[in-house]
Amino acid sequence: MQHIKIQNVSKLFGEARAIDHVDIVIEQGEFFTLLGPSGCGKTTLLRTLAGFYQQDEGDLYFDKVNINRTPAHKRNIGMVFQNYAIFPHMTVFENVAYGLKARKVKKDQIDIRVTEALDMVELTHLKDRSPSQLSGGQQQRVALARAIVIHPGLLLMDEPLSNLDAKLRVKMREDIRRLQKDLDITTIYVTHDQEEALAVSDRIAVMKDGKVQQIGRPYEIYLTPSNKFVASFIGSTNFLTGHVSDGKELKNTEIQVEGIQLSRVFNRDYAGEVIYSIRPEQVRLSDLKHVRTSKTITGKIKEASFLGQTVTYKVELATGTVIDVHEYSVSFHNLRREGDIVAVDLNPEQSVVFDVSGEEVLNECDNREKAEVLPV
């Protein structure tokens, strides 16, 4: 179990900065996820931590020990790769035992530790099989057992579930999360899958173009994104253009959005164009007869997609703008039909307002106050 400090780390390939002055502190026993699109630098950062790459700037610390010049094989790291990287000519048992043999562990201890690791990933009954006789999920469990059997201080996982089908991914991520907590291993996990990151992580670092955009707990990043990129990458959201004519009255800033005035408390003086972000599940739909406020506008259901627990609607507002709305499907009879005219409440209390560049949050983060009462 290790405390990790990444201090002002950069990695260049030619003139391109794959990692750009990254600062992250990861606590002992934490499940920390690097999340972002392809090419954002998350795998490069993971491989730099593993010792496969040497950073060009900055320092890496494991438990306050600088490991800049420590070779990969001396960093006490277990790693699970996207492609499993298990040896096809070895049995399951031999694959898991490989790292222990390389460390010259005694045979009786190898037998005990490999059996324990296989039991943890529920593969003891397959210990004599070759990888070619295993499913993708089973091969991934072998890779996981091989990583944990050496009792690493740090576990690194690079897109470990991307080759599995959707249902098996959900099962495996639950197993990985349970195993990590049981073993109390500091874990850094790389993925581009937002749902996966939200489900398994204690904290998440969202990356773009080699830079960290935001670090926080899953609900913090979802409810209070630090910029437009984070808001768009974590889940889905509607971006509407708004305008503030005079933002000096901080306690009651009026934003004109889709032809109506919405009030929001800003954190500074501001006037001009803004980006009004509202997530689909935070938009409220109701029958027109229930409209009780001038801050509600009309809309028309253009598409309805039934997804089991929820229904996703494409709603065309009176201004012609089309937004996404998610509602729970309580029963068949409450489903809205294409062509229905509805009242749309843009729910300003749940919105996030960015400046015109999308880089600064203008509203007071009342969502954060609500998030802080949620369980850790």
Image (cartoon, rainbow, N blue to C red):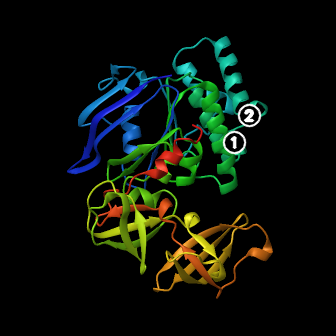
Q: Which amino acid does label 1 sit on?
A: Gln
Pointer 2 local density, CA inside 10 Å: few below 14, some 14–19, many at least 20: some
Q: What element carries label 2?
A: loop
Give residue 147's quadrant in the image: top right
Q: Which residue is drawn at 61% across and 11% down?
A: 106
Give me the C-alpha separation between circle 1 and circle 2.
8 Å
> Residue 138 got which mark?
1
Residue 227 vs 246, above or below: the answer is above
Earlier sequence position, callout 1 versus callout 2 = 2
In percent of width and height, residue 350 lies at 50, 60
> Residue 15 got which mark?
none
Q: Which amino acid does label 2 sit on?
A: Leu
Quadrant including the C terminus = top right
Q: Between 150 and 212, which is closer to the camera in this rendering?
A: 212
For the question of whether residue 52 can be seen, the reply is: no
Residue carrying label 2: 123
As drawn, the residue found furthest toward the bottom would be 339
Q: Residue at x 59, y 52 (%)?
A: 163
For the question of whether residue 175 can be seen, the reply is: yes
Question: Looking at the image, do the residues carrying marks 1 and 2 touch, with CB atoms under 8 Å apart?
Answer: yes
Q: What element carries label 1?
A: helix
Q: How many labels does the image show?
A: 2
Residue 85 vs 235, above or below: the answer is above
